Image: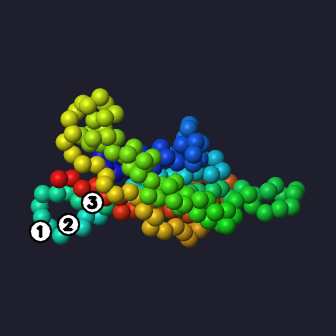
């Protein structure tokens, strides 16, 4: 439930008017991996859970202490200008780096407790945020996330074949990962 909650919270933040203004989910969504849906347009932000690590070395059996990671994979089709015109591709590697840098800026996802972590906690049954969102039912029985997502890094830009997005015309895609992690959930 923690992995589902944190990926959904990041998706909600991306879709907000403050970030992508993608209320219908045309350019962003939760995916199993960084691969976008086969019907994507020119650009897509795939949110996926990239793992959880526990610092617990086994000496303490009771608490579940896990640091969660979320990756946002930005995919852009390399749409090429028609042959009867002169010009470059629509998206370049530099364009994707600019998008990644914008996403990595403070308070978009990085360190954003209000619009990311509180949303994640409100999705976990038994947390104070879930209870508050549901009129006090059920009672508080567990802790939610206690530390926000931090930026772990981004890049490099990689080229993927057209099959990455289900394209049969052979046009390639550019992809960049923006990695966030260390969102701590301590269940006692």
Q: Residue at x 56, y 38 (%)?
A: 23
| SS state under label 3 | strand
Q: Outermost residue, top direction?
A: 135
Q: Residue at x 17, y 53 (%)?
A: 188
Q: Residue at x 30, y 38 (%)?
A: 130
Given residues 141 and 90, the one toward you in this image is 141
- Density class for disc 1 (Cα within 10 Å; few <14, some 14-19, many ≥20) is few
- For the rendered model, the colour scheme is rainbow
Name the mark on residue 59: 1
**Residue 106 in the figure: left or right of residue 84:** left
Of the residues under marks 3 and 2, which one precedes in the sequence? Answer: 2
Q: How many marks?
A: 3
Say whether residue 77 is visible. Answer: yes
| SS state under label 1 | loop
- Density class for disc 2 (Cα within 10 Å; few <14, some 14-19, many ≥20) is few
Residue 41 image offset from top left, x and y in percent: 64, 47
Given residues 98 and 34, the one toward you in this image is 98
């Amino acid at each position: 439930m923690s992995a589902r909650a944190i990926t959904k919270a990041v998706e909600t933040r991306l879709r907000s008017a403050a970030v992508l203004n993608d209320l219908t989910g045309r350019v962003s969504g939760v995916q199993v991996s960084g691969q976008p849906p086969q019907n994507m347009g020119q650009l897509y932000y795939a949110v996926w859970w990239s793992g959880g690590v526990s610092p617990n070395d086994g000496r303490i059996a009771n608490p579940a202490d896990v640091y969660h990671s979320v990756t946002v994979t930005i995919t852009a089709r390399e749409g090429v200008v028609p042959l009867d015109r002169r010009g470059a591709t629509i998206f370049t590697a530099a364009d994707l780096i600019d998008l990644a840098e914008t996403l990595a800026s403070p308070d978009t996802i990085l360190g954003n407790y209000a619009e990311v972590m509180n949303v994640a906690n409100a999705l976990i049954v038994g947390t104070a945020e879930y209870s508050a969102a549901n009129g006090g039912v059920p009672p508080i029985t567990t802790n939610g996330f206690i530390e926000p997502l931090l930026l772990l890094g981004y890049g490099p830009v990689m080229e993927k074949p057209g099959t990455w997005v289900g394209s049969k015309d052979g046009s390639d895609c550019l992809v960049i990962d923006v990695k966030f992690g260390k969102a701590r959930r301590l269940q006692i």
